[in-house]
Image (cartoon, rainbow, N blue to C red):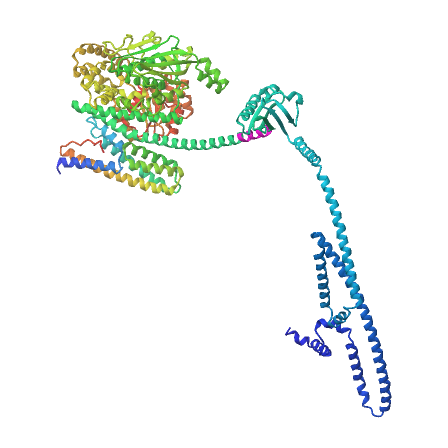
């Protein structure tokens, strides 16, 4: 693929992530923090987010599958996930976590299960998209191009 | 009847038997009565006899006997016939006698009737002799005829036979006699009547007597009415002198009244009015009614309904008036009460509806405000992103034109952010969320700093001056941030609208203003005492020699979104919220903001605020406290200095020659003079000051004017200096690399260059010494989320800081115990020990000097005790909460637990930068 075309498609793809509400402006903050001294900052943070979230989601699944659900354990996990997702701008995961926490407060096991599914779904979505995004970026870098700056005007 | 037929058969048969017993020649029912007494009944009896004897005839043997018997029977029959004839004659005679008797009786009755008729006739008609007689005779005949019609025919014949008898004539004579008698009687009556008429004639001959009688009656009636009517009546002559008066409740004797006028009799309210009213009626000649309230010594206050009518003589000339008065005081009182009640009712209803309306409006307003605040908040976050990104963009390599465009963009963004912050401030004040702080501060320094800051961005040839009278205390207690906000707002306003001359601040102590005294009275005694003993009222005038404000615009000056005129808004820009916020803040602090102005001469904005006076024994402490805000290098006399002046276009910026104290950026001004911008601005474009750019933008249609840049470059040293003194610790490297001389050379102002270089060199040296004295600020991030830590750390790095990390409250306490920090960013929700509790424990340590509270709370003893002696915090450590919720209740919780401020998550560069600017000096 032509470099310019790749850059264009990366831009479009990024834009679509914002338009779909998968990412929010906080992700731009991450991109701003990425500079020459720290060229892989975004992917580092996001990778950390993936690792952390995989673990949290695993723990959550286990906790909710218990005979007696200990909401004191569940809630901090959800809080954690909410904080992380909010920090990287994974807006839809964050929103799902907000709903999840409400049901944790109500100690509604059934609803929590549903929320967990929702959170997982959103998480895998954002994970998938971000991985694609990084792949595109890597391809551009590999072809010797610059990763285009995010447009501010959308 | 059909069904009854059989049962009643026997009866019916009886009836038939009975009916057959009646002879066929029986007449009509009507005749039966008469037939009963007829001899027919006897005939029947004979028949019966013969029927009985028939069986005996059949016996031949006894025939002679029978013959004898028959003879006997015949003679007996003959006897019987004789006897019957006799009896018949006798009966006839008796009947005739009876008839005669009856006739006589009838005649008598007729005569009586006649007499009655005649009497009646006389009563109804005039006596007329002949017709009456005729009529009566006719009547008589008619009567007779009628009577005869009723009688049985046979008897009628008998009577007709008697018609020509003596009795008839006798009868006739009798009746005639009676008629004569009646006639005579009538005559007598007529004579009587004549006599009577004569008598009446005689009585009619004396009418005066009768009239007199009538008059007497009428008088009696009138007296009756007058005595019982609760009214005053009077008759007055042309001069309104009483000729007659009647009063039900007389309080004056007649001689006191008669011949006098009202005015001569009474004194007091209403007398003149009634007199005038009577005169008016007299002149107009028309009767009229009026209600007049009298207030006289004689009968107190009473209301009379007075009816006055003019009186004319026969020639039609007015000769006086009649008047009638009725006391209606009670009725009037009642009526007035009713009216009042009705009025009250109406007022209450109106108030009720008004109240309902107000409630409705208030609810609507609250909702609208809430929405505005929410929206503003929602707008602020993305906008911060835009502005932040633009700022980051400005750090990259740009050509001149791009930079100019970017500057305009940043300044516009800043303006919108400022507007939104203003809106949020306003809604905070209005909803009562805004809390005032009480900190000690030095008014002189505040004034000086405000003027310095203003001078830093000044690009007009204005003199900024500060004048503080000696009686203003060195230190007072109040919400210094808000007071600075007000002062800065007023000063920047004044500068904006002033093109030459002076802008200044004047402080003086005044006595307690009247509005405050009223408030204090309402507030109650105990509060009052505490306040008056230690408080001082300071009046602050912010004056200018600017364009002034037309009088008619002053009332809407403090209204939101209003400027003196739309022309001004176009020409000078601005949000129109500044003054509204100032006013609300001043009022929130219990003061008053007023303005006096003259068009083309200038304006004076005055606010009066109460402050508590800091007591002298706290003095040593607040030195420490103020070490945060004020430069330790300040000369001692700086604290009492009463006059400062800042003039532009002078080699030395400060005319008072004192050391430079440019380190206090106001929180809400932070964005306008942010260090990053200053640094970058100095490298490429020294005019990078938002306030300037804002004005430039407005005046030049969006492009920065080269000449303005030149002028503004003059202020570079100051700006650089400010930053170096204030924030040099954080940005030392950058500041060294971008010296102000470089900046000024790039801006290309040759004349100024040497001077500027000199001054900036001097300041650079100073900055260096500063740097040696102060190390980089130490920041502690307390956060458990790895990703958050990574992001925050990276942001801090970009802002030129490094951070220590603690993963929970306990680690934070240990870290604070080990070394001294300048700022703590504290997550609220953490495992082990959350941010709120950790902050409380830290505050407790600051107050008591030991970690006992923390140890009690379960924090590891050893680590704390070991170092306890070494570190003794004397300053209040700024602790900034990082909270996921931005709701007011959550922020209140943060404040309540001893935190200084809070950042809502997710943390952005912009938020961090603002926070650092506010809390790191």
Most common secondary structure along the magenta stretch:
helix
User: In this orientation, does residue B920 appear?
Assistant: yes
Examine the image and state in which quarter residue B637 appears. Answer: top left
> Going by the picture, which residue comes out furthest to the bottom?
B61
Residue B698 locus on image (x, y percent):
24, 22
Up-down relation of residue B621 to residue A143 (above or below): above
Q: Nearer the viewer, residue B268 or B222?
A: B222
* Left or right for B734, reference B193: left
User: In this orientation, does residue B884 appear?
Assistant: no
* Left or right for A2, reference B384: left
Residue B40 locus on image (x, y percent):
77, 77
Q: Nearer the viewer, residue B862 or B482?
A: B482
Residue B825 locus on image (x, y percent):
33, 24
Up-down relation of residue A126 to residue B767 (above or below): below
Up-down relation of residue B233 to residue B47 (above or below): above
Q: Nearer the viewer, residue B311 or B726?
A: B311
Residue at the image point whose x is 75% and y is 50% from the top: B189
Asked if residue B87 lies in the magenta stretch, the reply is no
Tell me the magenta residue range: B328-339
* Left or right for A30, reference B54: left
Q: Which corner quadrant holds the N terminus of chain B?
A: bottom right
Q: Nearer the viewer, residue B127 or B772?
A: B127
> Going by the picture, which residue comes out furthest to the left?
A2
Examine the image and state in which quarter residue A84 appears. Answer: top left
Examine the image and state in which quarter residue B649 appears. Answer: top left
């Amino acid at each position: 693929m032509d470099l310019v075309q790749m850059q264009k498609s990366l831009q479009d793809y990024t834009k679509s992530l914002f338009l779909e509400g998968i990412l929010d402006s906080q992700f731009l903050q991450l991109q701003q923090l990425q500079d020459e001294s720290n060229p892989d900052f975004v992917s580092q943070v996001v990778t950390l987010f993936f690792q952390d979230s995989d673990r949290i989601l695993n723990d959550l699944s286990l906790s909710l599958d218990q005979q007696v659900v200990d909401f004191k354990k569940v809630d901090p996990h959800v809080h954690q996930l909410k904080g992380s997702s909010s920090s990287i701008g994974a807006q839809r995961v964050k929103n799902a976590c907000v709903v999840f926490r409400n049901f944790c407060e109500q100690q509604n096991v059934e609803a929590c299960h549903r929320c967990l599914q929702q959170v997982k779904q959103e998480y895998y979505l954002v994970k998938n998209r971000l991985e694609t995004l990084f792949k595109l970026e890597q391809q551009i870098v590999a072809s010797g191009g610059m990763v285009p700056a995010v447009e501010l005007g959308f | 009847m059909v069904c009854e037929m059989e049962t009643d058969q026997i009866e019916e048969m009886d009836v038939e038997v009975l009916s057959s017993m009646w002879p066929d020649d029986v007449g009509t029912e009507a005749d039966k009565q008469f037939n009963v007494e007829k001899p027919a009944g006897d005939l029947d009896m004979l028949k019966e006899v013969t029927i009985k004897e028939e069986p005996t005839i059949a016996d031949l043997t006894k025939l002679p006997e029978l013959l004898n018997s028959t003879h006997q029977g015949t003679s007996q029959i003959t006897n019987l016939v004789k006897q019957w004839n006799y009896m018949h004659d006798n009966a006839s005679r008796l009947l005739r006698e009876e008839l005669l008797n009856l006739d006589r009786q009838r005649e008598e009755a007729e005569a009586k009737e006649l007499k009655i008729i005649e009497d009646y006739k006389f009563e109804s008609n005039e006596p007329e002799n002949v017709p009456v007689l005729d009529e009566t005779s006719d009547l008589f005949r008619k009567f007779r005829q009628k009577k005869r019609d009723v009688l049985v025919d046979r008897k009628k014949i008998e009577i007709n036979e008697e018609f020509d008898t003596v009795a008839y004539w006798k009868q006739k004579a009798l009746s005639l006699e009676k008629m004569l008698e009646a006639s005579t009687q009538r005559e007598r009556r007529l004579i009587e009547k004549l006599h009577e008429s004569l008598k009446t004639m005689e009585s009619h001959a004396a009418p005066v007597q009768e009239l007199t009688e009538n008059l007497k009656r009428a008088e009696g009636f009138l007296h009756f009415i007058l005595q019982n009517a609760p009214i005053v009546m009077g008759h007055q002559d042309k001069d309104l002198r009483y000729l007659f008066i009647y009063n039900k409740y007389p309080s004056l004797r007649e001689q006191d009244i008669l011949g006098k006028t009202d005015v001569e009799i009474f004194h007091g309210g209403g007398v003149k009015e009634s007199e005038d009213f009577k005169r008016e009626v007299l002149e107009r000649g028309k009767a009229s009614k009026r209600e007049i309230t009298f207030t006289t010594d004689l009968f107190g206050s009473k209301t009379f309904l007075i009816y006055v009518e003019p009186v004319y003589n026969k020639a039609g000339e007015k000769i006086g008036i009649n008047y009638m008065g009725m006391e209606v005081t009670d009725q009037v009182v009642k009526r007035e009460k009713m009216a009042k009640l009705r009025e009250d009712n109406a007022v209450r209803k109106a108030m009720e509806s008004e109240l309902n309306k107000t409630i409705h409006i208030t609810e609507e307003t609250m909702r609208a405000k809430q929405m505005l605040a929410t929206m503003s908040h929602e707008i602020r976050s993305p906008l911060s992103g835009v502005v932040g990104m633009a700022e980051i963009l400005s750090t990259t390599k740009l050509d001149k034109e791009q930079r100019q465009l970017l500057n305009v963009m940043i300044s516009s963004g800043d303006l919108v952010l400022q507007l939104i912050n203003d809106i949020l401030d306003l809604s905070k004040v209005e909803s009562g969320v805004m809390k005032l702080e009480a900190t000690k501060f030095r008014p002189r320094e505040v004034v000086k700093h405000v003027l310095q800051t203003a001078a830093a961005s000044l690009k007009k040839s204005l003199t900024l001056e500060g004048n503080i009278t000696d009686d203003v205390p060195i230190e007072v207690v109040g919400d210094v941030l808000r007071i600075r906000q007000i002062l800065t707002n007023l000063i920047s306003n004044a500068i904006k609208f002033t093109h030459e001359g002076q802008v200044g601040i004047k402080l003086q102590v005044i006595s307690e203003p009247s509005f405050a005294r009223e408030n204090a009275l309402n507030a109650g005694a105990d509060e009052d005492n505490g306040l008056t003993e230690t408080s001082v009222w300071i009046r602050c005038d912010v004056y200018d020699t600017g364009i002034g404000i037309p009088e008619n615009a002053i009332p809407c000056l403090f209204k939101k979104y209003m400027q003196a005129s739309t022309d001004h808004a176009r020409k000078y820009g601005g949000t129109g919220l500044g003054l509204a916020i100032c006013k609300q803040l001043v009022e929130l602090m219990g003061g008053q903001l007023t303005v006096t102005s003259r068009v083309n001469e200038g304006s004076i904005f005055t606010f009066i605020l109460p402050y508590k006076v800091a007591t002298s024994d706290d003095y040593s402490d607040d030195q420490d406290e103020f070490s945060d805000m004020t430069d330790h290098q300040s000369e001692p006399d700086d604290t009492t200095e009463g006059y400062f002046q800042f003039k532009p276009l002078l080699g030395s910026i400060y005319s008072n020659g004192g050391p430079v104290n440019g380190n206090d950026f106001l929180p809400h001004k932070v964005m306008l003079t942010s260090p990053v911008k200053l640094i970058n601005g100095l490298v490429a474009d020294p005019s990078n000051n938002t306030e300037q750019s804002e004005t430039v933008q407005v005046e030049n249609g969006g492009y920065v004017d080269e000449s303005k840049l030149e002028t503004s470059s003059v202020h570079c040293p100051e700006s650089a200096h400010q930053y170096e003194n204030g924030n040099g610790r954080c940005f030392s490297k950058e500041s060294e690399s971008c010296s102000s001389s470089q900046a000024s050379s790039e801006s290309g102002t040759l004349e100024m260059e040497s001077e500027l270089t000199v001054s900036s060199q001097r300041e650079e040296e100073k900055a260096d010494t500063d740097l040696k004295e102060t190390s980089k600020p130490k920041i502690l991030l307390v956060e458990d989320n790895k990703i958050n830590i990574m992001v925050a750390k990276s942001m801090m790095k970009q802002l030129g800081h490094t951070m220590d990390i603690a993963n929970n409250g306990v680690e934070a306490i240990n870290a604070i115990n080990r070394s001294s920090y300048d700022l703590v960013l504290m997550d609220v929700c953490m495992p082990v020990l959350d941010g709120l509790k950790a902050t409380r424990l830290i505050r407790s340590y600051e107050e008591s000097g030991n970690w006992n509270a923390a140890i009690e709370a379960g924090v590891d003893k050893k680590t704390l005790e070991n170092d306890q002696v070494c570190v003794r915090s004397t300053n209040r450590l700024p602790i900034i909460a990082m909270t996921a919720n931005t709701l007011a209740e959550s922020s209140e919780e943060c404040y309540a637990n001893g935190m200084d401020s809070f950042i809502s998550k997710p943390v952005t560069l912009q938020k961090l930068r603002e926070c650092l600017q506010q809390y790191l000096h």
